[in-house]
Image (tube, rainbow, N blue to C red):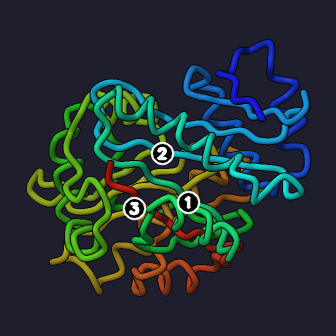
């Protein structure tokens, strides 16, 4: 068995490894390869590509995502562990504090990551809904860069209790240039609710995914969350999406109930594991 650092000329080998991987795993690794190809490794057995691992490690971050896949008939041979150790060495060199991985609930995966020292933190539902004709929802403003700090700080306060309880890192969402850049790029698809200039609720739809939905505690139970989701669905309809999706922490029962009542259904559930390094 041989571990080789990924190179674009090895893309066909990566495709061979992932040819029969479950769709979520294949998409996850390919999305990482698209941006972080320098952080990928391929395992070969007798010259054949049989496993792949990738991460989103880069300087300046303390936490990185880790994804790995080994073809089923080559498992239980230590290949996955060797791929992980390659990623771990890179993470240590970059000063990472933790690695995170997620995957559809599966006993083999749980056994594997647990053997590497990962601990489960929480689960998350991937939910979808068909997009149909909808009426616009009033009362929301389109996001602009002047709202950046207020938006991120309001979202951080809204999610702090559950992130703290479940140990989701970072516990406090802090404003940074990556978030600013994304929100600036997606500004015309993000919406906020304000009172006296203070952002109290917000969210958006981007690439057919509804994201960053939050409501300040003092407004909960007043239908604001439902309205912001409906506003995003109206935008999705305008954009021509046939289906939109979202991720929601399974332990966030009020949010899961809200999305279910609107018409979202759970397509799959992922378990999230963390390893401190």
- Left or right of residue 147: residue 58: right
- Left or right of residue 161: residue 261: right
The residue that appears at 49% across and 87% down in the rendered structure is 257
The residue that appears at 27% across and 27% down in the rendered structure is 60
- Left or right of residue 150: residue 90: right
Q: CA distance from mark 1 to mark 2?
A: 8 Å
- Which numbered disc, 2 or 3, marks the residue that appears first in the sequence? 2
Label 2 sits on residue: 65
Q: Secondary structure at mark 1?
A: strand
Q: Quadrant of residue 218?
A: bottom left
The residue that appears at 58% across and 58% down in the rendered structure is 234
Label 1 sits on residue: 102
Disc number lying in front (1 or 3): 1
Label 3 sits on residue: 213
Give yes or no for contact between labels 2 and 3 (Cβ–Cβ under 8 Å): no
- Which numbered disc, 1 or 3, marks the residue that appears first in the sequence? 1
Q: CA distance from mark 1 to mark 3?
A: 21 Å
61 or 133, nearer to the observer:
61
- Tell me the crowding category of disc 1: few under 14, some 14 to 19, or many 20 or more residues within 10 angstroms, Cα based: many
Residue 248: image tag: none
Q: Secondary structure at mark 2?
A: strand
């Amino acid at each position: 068995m041989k571990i080789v650092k990924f190179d674009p000329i090895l893309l066909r080998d990566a495709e061979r490894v992932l040819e029969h991987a479950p769709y979520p795993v294949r998409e996850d690794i390919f999305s990482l390869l698209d941006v972080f190809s320098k952080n990928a490794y391929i395992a070969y057995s007798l010259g054949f590509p049989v496993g792949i691992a990738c991460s989103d490690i880069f300087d300046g971050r303390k936490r990185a995502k880790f994804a790995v896949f080994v073809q089923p008939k080559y498992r239980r041979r230590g290949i996955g562990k060797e791929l992980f150790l390659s990623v771990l060495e890179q993470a240590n060199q970059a000063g990472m504090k933790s690695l995170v991985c997620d995957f559809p609930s599966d006993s083999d995966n749980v056994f594997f990551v647990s053997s590497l020292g990962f601990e489960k933190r929480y689960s998350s539902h991937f939910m979808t809904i068909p997009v149909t004709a909808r009426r616009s929802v009033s009362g929301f403003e389109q996001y602009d860069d002047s709202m950046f700090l207020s938006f991120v700080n309001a979202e951080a306060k809204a999610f702090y209790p559950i992130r703290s309880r479940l140990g989701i890192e970072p516990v406090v969402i802090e404003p940074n240039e990556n978030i600013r850049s994304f929100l600036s790029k997606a500004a015309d698809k993000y919406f906020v609710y304000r009172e006296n200039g203070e952002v109290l609720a917000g969210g958006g739809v981007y690439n057919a995914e509804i994201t960053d939905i939050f409501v300040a505690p003092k407004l909960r139970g007043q239908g604001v969350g439902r309205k912001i989701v409906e506003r995003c669905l109206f935008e999705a309809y305008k954009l021509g999406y046939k289906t939109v999706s979202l991720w929601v922490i399974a332990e966030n029962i009020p949010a899961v109930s809200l999305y279910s009542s609107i018409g979202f259904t759970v397509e799959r559930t992922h378990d999230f594991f963390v390893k401190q390094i």
